Image: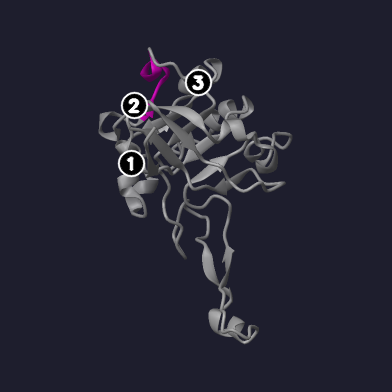
Amino acid sequence: MPQRLIDLSHRIEAGMETFKGLPGPAICDFWTREASAANYEDGSSFQIGRIDMVSNTGTYVDAPFHRYADGCDLADLPLASIAELEAVVIQRPHDQGLATDASDFSGVNVRGKAVLICTGWDKHWRTPPYFNDHPFLTEAAANYLAEQGAAFVGIDSHNIDDTRTKRRPVHTILLGAGIPIGEHLTNLTGLPRDGFTFHAAPPRIAGMGTFPVRAYAVLRD
């Protein structure tokens, strides 16, 4: 069957800000092409890059270890929870309200699926408004998705929780149920409501709970 790929990830660039108070990535050459050329008789040259960044950079996935010391880390995150997932998009335009509640999933089968909340907030990416009064899920929505057996929950916003408060119930509930979270997704407006698969696999790193991903959708035309 013909397939079409849609990239759902932001570019990671030197110095960009993903989360207020966290440093942007430093990207440079560790081994330059000019320096490497002297090592080969045929003139071959290679670049080996170096990046110094916090794990919450760009579009990333949270594993349970991000919230819970005894939760599974990136290395133990089941592939079935981050790849080849049947997906469903919930349209919640930010200009119709910031909160996505349990009632917004009424009549939608989320069991075993990646549930992607499309708010359109990604249009503010790398601008000051992106960090303020952003779309989020309510505690009731998180409870509903956990009870209904969602496999993955993602949003095209600054945070899946309401950062105007000092509570993080959505992270607590979803990660406590073993459901990975995707934040800072983009291009969700280009997806159909369903009929596609979602992929967002981070490197298999032990001892970390969050890392950037190349999230993408595979549409079956």
Marks 1 and 2, the one that precedes in the sequence: 1
Residue drawn at point x = 61 percent, y = 35 percent: 79
Type of amino acid under label 2 = Arg
| x 59%, y 45%: residue | 210
At 64% from the left edge and 43% from the top edge, which residue is drawn? 209
Q: Residues within 10 Å of mark 3 (few under 14, many from 20)?
A: many
Mark 1 or mark 3: which comes first in sequence?
1
Residue found at the very far top of the displayed protein = 107
Instruction: From this view, report whether residue 134 is shown above or below residue 194.
Output: below
Q: Report the residue marked by disc 1.
A: 121
**Left or right placement of residue 204 versus residue 215 in this view:** right
**Which element type, helix, strand or loop, lies under badge 1?**
helix
Determine whether the residue tagged by mark 3 lies in a helix, strand or loop: helix
Q: Which residue is mark 3?
A: 145
Q: Are marks 1 and 2 in contact (CB under 8 Å)?
A: no
Q: Residues within 10 Å of mark 2 (few under 14, many from 20)?
A: some
The one nearer the camera, 195 or 119, is: 195
Q: Amino acid at mark 3?
A: Leu
Residue 182 in sight: yes
Disc 1 marks a residue whose amino acid type is Trp
- In magenta, the rendered stretch is 99-106
Residue 14 position within the rendered picture, expressed as x and y whole percent measured from the top left: 47, 65
Closer to the observer: label 2 or label 3? 2
Disc 1 to disc 2, how far (Cα)? 18 Å
State the count of labels.
3
Quadrant location, the C terminus = top left
Q: Which residue is mark 2?
A: 193
Colouring method of the image: one colour
Question: Is residue 138 on the magenta stretch?
Answer: no
Return the disc, 2 or 3, that comes first in the chain's sequence: 3
**Residue placed most toward the observer, 106 or 6:** 6
